Image: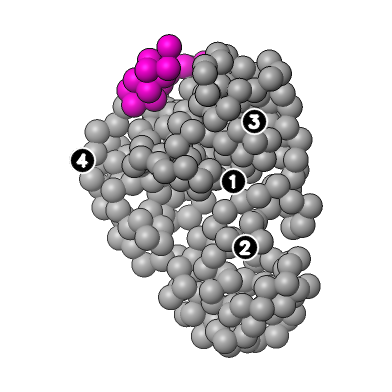
Amino acid sequence: MQKIIVNEDVNERIDKYLSDITDYSRSLILKMLKDECILVNDNIVKASYKVKENDEIKIIKEYTEEIDLEPEDIPLDIVFEDENVILINKPSGMVVHPGSGNPAHTLVNALLAHTKNLSEGSDTLRPGIVHRIDKDTSGLILVAKNNKAHEILADDFKNKKVKRKYIALVKGILSHNHITIDAPIGRDKIDRKKMMVTEHNSKDAITHVNVLKRFNKYTLVECELKTGRTHQIRVHLAYIGHPVYNDPTYQRDKTTSFGQFLHSSEITFTEPITKEELHFKVPLPNEFQEFLDTLD
């Protein structure tokens, strides 16, 4: 069961509200409401119900989008693979798994064409997927090939045993070489598809930032996550006044189709079955590196 406490003055239809803050499509939410699988303050409500502050919404039965997972012959940049895990260098622009608005052409579709050995995942649309990175964030993502590996890796991520580093190009000049951003993150009150630093209905979030190089109008930084919140690096860097360059969501300048200049560059983890300590590092995507070269 999923529970949502409304900590803001919404006054919006419940089907619209839930489609904004969850991965469910509006049509699927309508079906869940009709089937009485969504309760507000333990009461059955219609789609026209207006959500109010302090409402307690319970999703008592989860539904899955009716999407047929099909293998697709999409090239994969495989950094490492054994019988338990696959480490992929994901390109910017690739969605990790199918969902509302993205029924195909995802990393999962490519993985299904590559191997028949994937863990069951957290739901039927996410075989093998232990963690995610944003569509327009490039770089390393770890995939489980069996349920035992998935269980161990998920626990390692939860307990912060997996270490990841990101490279980002931010706007402006950071004055300090080392920064720790400790600011809770929750849903944006206006646009609930976005996240923001807020005390309301939020979770603790900590990001360590180290300056790698300063340019005339930009700074190249390395970020290490101590927590794993949605859009964490992008939100935190925008919060301190240095949004990620080319980010279509958290900065106002015009952007290209490449998306934010944010790259998952390094990962250190324990192979879940063999217990071997593994470390990998991948270079920046061509578009990222070529833009940096113009700044020198």
Crowd around label 2: few <14 · some 14–19 · many ≥20 (10 Å): few
In the rendered view of the protein, which quadrant contains the N terminus?
Answer: bottom right
Position above or below: 13 against 24: below
Q: Which label's residue is closer to the chain start, 2 or 1? A: 2
Q: Give the residue number, with chain letter if any, for mark 3.
A: 225
> Tag 3: residue type?
Leu
Q: Give the residue number, with chain letter if any, for mark 4.
A: 73
**The label number, if any, that marks residue 230 in the structure image:** 1
**The label number, if any, that marks residue 190 in the structure image:** 2
> Tag 4: residue type?
Asp
Q: Which of labels 1 and 4 is toward the front?
A: 1
Decide which of 82, 75 is in the foreground and name it.
Answer: 75
Asked if residue 285 is among those painted magenta in the image, a careful observer would answer yes
Q: Which label's residue is closer to the chain start, 1 or 4? A: 4
Which type of secondary structure does the marked residue at label 2 adopt?
loop
Q: Which of labels 3 and 2 is toward the front?
A: 2
Q: CA distance from mark 3 to mark 2?
A: 26 Å
> Tag 2: residue type?
Ile
Magenta stretch bounds: 279-296
**The label number, if any, that marks residue 107 in the structure image:** none
Answer left or right for 78 relative to 20. Answer: left
In the rendered view of the protein, which quadrant contains the C terminus?
Answer: top left
Quick check: marks 4 and 2 in contact, CB under 8 Å?
no
Q: Which of labels 3 and 4 is toward the front?
A: 3
Q: Which label's residue is closer to the chain start, 3 or 4? A: 4
* Rendering quarter of residue 92: top left
